[in-house]
Each structure stands twice: as structure tokens, then as C-alpha cells.
Image: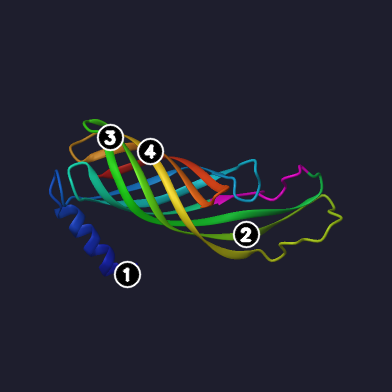
Amino acid sequence: MTRWTMAAVLVAWAAAPAVGQGRLGVEAYGGVLFDEYDARTPTTGAIAGLRLGYGITGRTRLVASTGYGETNDVLNPNGLRDYYRKGNNWIFTTAGLEHDVIRGRTGASVALEGGAAWRSLDDEGVVGRPTYPDEWAGGGTSAYGTLAVGATLRQRVASRWEVSLTVRDYWMELERHSPAVSLGVGRR
């Protein structure tokens, strides 16, 4: 993103009205990613990102999110003693709608977003002496269509500032997904 684009977003955000429609909000978040994409048992990692929202009604917002997640040691589904260690680096970009189901100083919302996820599979080393060839040598990058379903609890801590707890599940395929739990700080 260029400096001018970032400056324009910040000016629009700061000038947005305090309540109701047309208000632009931004939230930074960080938390835990449970990467179940490669193995059926989740590998725990970290996720961090930025989320923008634009009020289209008093309860509903257009939202756009981008996040970066990282997990390690994702490819040992059979619990082998000797194996090749791999790590996933994820970039999630989604957009959709968020609707407040409970309004007020303490609120709750649900969201449905669609977008894309990019995964980079990284070589992290070898554990023991594997007797089979490394099928994923050199890693690689893949892109996936993504559906993100989420629920958020928010607590207003100042007139336009709030903290949030979000549970979001990124679905890349019908049986492959990566849930995340994050804490955020935002301004609406």
C-alpha cells in the first residue's frame, strides 16, 4: 500500500462520523491459529492482521480483513519419530458482511466473508532419519478460495475505542479449515 493510500484511509477514518451509517472503523488483531489444513490434528500457531469495517446501516457493516498466520511442524499426521518438518505461512484476505446481534457498550456480532488464502509450505528441517523421500521438498505456494465465518464479542472502553474477542474459521475446502481465536483493539 502506498503512503498516499494509507494517508487517505487514515484521514477518512479520523473524519468519519461518531455513530451510525458511513462510519469507517479499523481494528488490529492478534491471536492463535489452529492450522488443521495438512493434518487432521491442529497445529497451533500465531495470527495477526488488520480489519476494516464501513457501516451501511446501524447494525450492519461491510468488512475487509487481511491476516498473516504461521504454524510449524504441520506434516507429521501419523506421529512418526523420523520425518521432515514443514511449516505453513498463511495470508488470508476476505471481505463480506458483519451484523450486530447485540448492540450496546458490550455487543456481539456475526460475520460471513469470502476471499482468498495463500499458503507457503516451508522446509523447517529433519527430525531423525526419515527412510522415505521428501514429497514436499522445496516447499511451494498455493492459493485457495476461502470462506470465513466468525463471531465477535466487543466491549467499548472509550467513546470510539473498543476491545474484541473474535472466533473465526477459515474454510479452504469442505473438509479443510483453520480456526482462529484473536483479541483486537479497534476504533469505530
Q: Are marks 2 and 3 in contact (CB under 8 Å)?
A: no
Task: Identify the residue at image location x=18%, y=50%.
Answer: 23
Residue 87 vs residue 92, the one in the foreground: 92
72 within the magenta span: yes
* Residue 163, horizontal then vertical, whole percent: 32, 37
Q: Which residue is mark 1?
A: 2
Q: Amino acid at mark 1?
A: Thr
Q: Amino acid at mark 4?
A: Ala
Instruction: Relative to 8, say whether 53 is above or below.
Output: above
Which residue was labeled with disc 3? 101
Within 10 angstroms of label 1, few (less than 14), some, or many (20 or more) residues? Answer: few
Determine whether, in the image, residue 11 is placed left or right of residue 151: left
Q: Is residue 90 left or right of residue 127?
A: left
Q: Position of residue 77 (x, y in %)?
A: 72, 45
| N-terminal-most mark, 1 or 2 | 1
Instruction: Give the mark, 1 or 4, whose residue is nearer the N terminus.
Output: 1
Callout 4: SS: strand
- The mark lying in front, picked from 2 and 3, is 3
Q: Earlier in the sequence, mark 1 or mark 3?
A: 1
Which badge, 2 or 3, is on the more N-terminal residue? 3
Mark 1 against mark 2, which lies toward the viewer?
2
Q: Looking at the image, is 120 positioned above or below residue 34?
A: below
The kind of secondary structure element at disc 1 is loop
Left/right of residue 85 with respect to residue 98 in the rendered view: right
Region of the chain picked out in magenta, as a range = 70-79
Tell which circle, 3 or 4, labels the residue nearer the N-terminal end: 3
- Depth-wise, is mark 2 or mark 4 nearer the camera? 4
Give yes or no for contact between labels 3 and 4 (Cβ–Cβ under 8 Å).
Answer: no
